Amino acid sequence: MSVAVRNTRANTLTAGKLPKFAPWGLLAISWAIFVAVFLLLKASGSTKDFNIVGALFFGTILFDVLIVVISMVVEGGRKAKDRLVTSLVMSAFIVVLLPLVSLVYTVISRGVARFDVQYFTYSMRNVISVGGGALHAIVGTLEITAFATLISVPVGILTSIYLVEYGRGRLARAITFFVDVMTGIPSIVAGLFAYALFALIAGPAIRNGAMGSIALSVLMIPIVVRSSEEILKIVPNELREASYALGVPRWLTIVKIVLPTSFAGLATGVVLAISRVIGETAPLLLTTGFTTDMNYDLFSDRMMTLPVFVYTQYAQQGPDATPYLERAWTGALVLILIVMALNLIARIIGRFFAPRGR
């Protein structure tokens, strides 16, 4: 008798229920259907390119319909309503990601044409149409961003330490206000500031990599301050109080307790700030200018950067536009890969240096 009751309960719990993999399977099938549809449209000549965004969008709508209908038949109306709400939330998330998917797909599909050895080993010196590379732009981007980081990180972290550990009264409120203002300034204003500063010192004709680093540091400093301030606030006050109780002065507590505890978060914030400014174009057009030659000296002559390289290749096309467009798309791809690598480094640092609990 007990065995029969147990089997009845088991059947009651399992009957009329879709398997756990059903939503993901239906989503994959829906996407596959519309991928096939758009591939057929491209093959027939109705569309020029394969529209991955359209395939994913209409596939997601088909998934919403299928999951509700199948759930209504198998699980009943109440569960179908729950499936409908869940699928709509999932669809909203997918729709938000579609611009990113479109961007990545477009850049990769068009950027692989010049993703070769020559692109990473040659500059544009004496190149008129076909050939050439972006080595001078890659080197310029790395040098200018590194020098901007060297300027911004000490200033930003020391400012955040002051605001969290020492700041009280009008000065702290004033610093917080100006940091908020700097966070929202347009990037072109940072470029104008750096240009005006160096023009007053060396004349209006000056262009060099250091000017670009100054402009980028104006954009980086508020990001570093804000991220570092939030990380330092997370450090438990009990750690500080325990150190003070042992007679350790405040500055040594900050150096030995607060900073090591928050190192992972600080490093992550710095890397994310670098990722934020490495693709800026407007301030670098004003400060570094552009050139086709290699230049390793930040303080002498013009330097090329990847964002400016992409802009100039796209804006100043020759009679045959194809080589210029290929170099521009590949430059955009390289820039995206650098940003992705920086974000990956930030995650690795955050995981490796995170405090270990006992």
Image: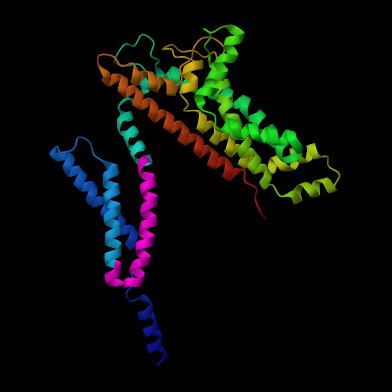
Main SS, magenta residues: helix
Q: Residue 218 at x, y = what percent? A: 58, 26
Q: Residue 331 at x, y = what percent? A: 39, 25
Q: Which residues are magenta?
A: 71-99
Q: Quadrant of the C terminus?
A: bottom right
Q: Is residue 144 visible?
A: no
Nearest to the observer: residue 68 or residue 10: 68
Q: Residue 90 at x, y = what percent? A: 38, 55
Above or below — where is 114 with respect to 3?
above
Nearest to the observer: residue 31 or residue 112: 31
Q: Quadrant of the N terminus?
A: bottom left
Query: Per the image, is 77 magenta?
Result: yes
Above or below — where is 275 with respect to 189?
below
- Answer with left or right where residue 245 lies relative to residue 329: right
Q: Residue 349 at x, y = what percent? A: 57, 40
Please name the residue shown 60% across and 35% down the image: 180
Q: Is residue 67 visible?
A: yes
Query: Per the image, is 46 magenta?
Result: no
- Answer with left or right where residue 214 lies relative to residue 251: left
